Amino acid sequence: EVQLVESGGGLVQPGGSLRLSCAASGFTVGSNYMSWVRQAPGKGLEWVSVIYSGGSTYYADSVKGRFTISRDIYKNTVYLQMNSLRAEDTAVYYCARQLTIWGYAFDIWGQGTMLTVSS
Amino acid sequence: QSVLTQPPSASGTPGQRVTISCSGSSSNIGSNSVNWYQQLPGTAPKLLIYSNNQRPSGVPDRFSGSKSGTSASLAISGLQSEDEADYYCATWDASLNGWVFGGGTKLTVL
């Protein structure tokens, strides 16, 4: 079964760090575009970061310089290292696969993991 | 404020047809395909329409998408109570060098 399972969320103080994980099954993360998308409480969806199949990485301006996306092809897992966290980073973080042949649509989503940044 | 503009809410009665609009610009919708997502309360988003008007397997043909110029639309015919959800459009934005979502439309089935 094709599936994504996120983990690693929690409560962090402002200025702190956290790493989110996204374990994939049923497909290979190294052969696909993999993104992180977040949703603040009661708000809409916001794209955060992507890692291309070739390894290139891109970020939304709101997280550039603070977040780092990476992957481990042996563990078939994608990560999001988040540093210098701010209250406005509080959100549910979803991992999603993007299909290039489907117009880069986010076709598979994880269940999400909640990050709360608060003192 | 989202780069893609959607109405915050829409409504209809069972059996009715409703449309949700998504307005953008030449750097996003005008030059890239649009995808639509459905988010039921308390769940992760689900892909509804890709490449402007294509449905993944399992999505009912009551859902259809279209694009013209810098705008796109999602139409839902034969509205059902289980269609009550938030709907988001999304595409690539060449100016921002990233993917952008609309602000979302909350669909209420009366």
Image (spheres, coloured by chain):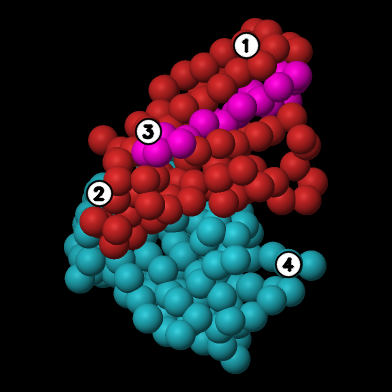
Chain colours: A cyan, B red
Identify the residue at horizontal 40%, vertical 38% (top origin): B69
Same subunit, labels 1 and 3: the answer reads yes
Same subunit, labels 3 and 2: the answer reads no
Disc 2 + disc 4, Cβ < 8 Å: no
What range is drawn magenta here? B68-87
Mark 3 to mark 2 CA distance (whole Å): 30 Å
| Residue receiving disc 3 | B23
Helix, strand or loop at disc 4? loop
Residue B79 sits in which quadrant? top right
Left or right: A74 in relation to A8: right
Give me the chain letter of mark 1: B
Mark 1 to mark 2 CA distance (whole Å): 37 Å
Identify the residue at horizontal 56%, vertical 22% (top origin): B19
Mark 3 to mark 4 CA distance (whole Å): 33 Å
Give me the chain letter of mark 4: A
Q: Residues within 10 Å of mark 1 (few under 14, many from 20)?
A: some
Helix, strand or loop at disc 1? strand
Q: Give, as a three-letter code, the residue at label 4.
A: Val
| Residue receiving disc 1 | B12
Q: Give, as a three-letter code, the residue at label 3.
A: Ser
Q: Where residue A2 is drawn, which disc sits there?
A: 4
Q: Give, as a three-letter code, the residue at label 2.
A: Ala
Q: Is residue B74 above or below residue A31?
A: above
Seen from this angle, which residue lies furthest bottom? A74
Helix, strand or loop at disc 3? strand
Q: Give, as a three-letter code, the residue at label 1.
A: Gly
Q: Where residue A87 is drawn, which disc sits there?
A: 2
Q: Give the number of the mark in front: 3 or 2.
A: 3
Residue A95 in the image: state x and y as whole percent.
Answer: 52, 62
Q: Can residue A12 be seen?
A: no
Q: Give the number of the mark in front: 1 or 2.
A: 1
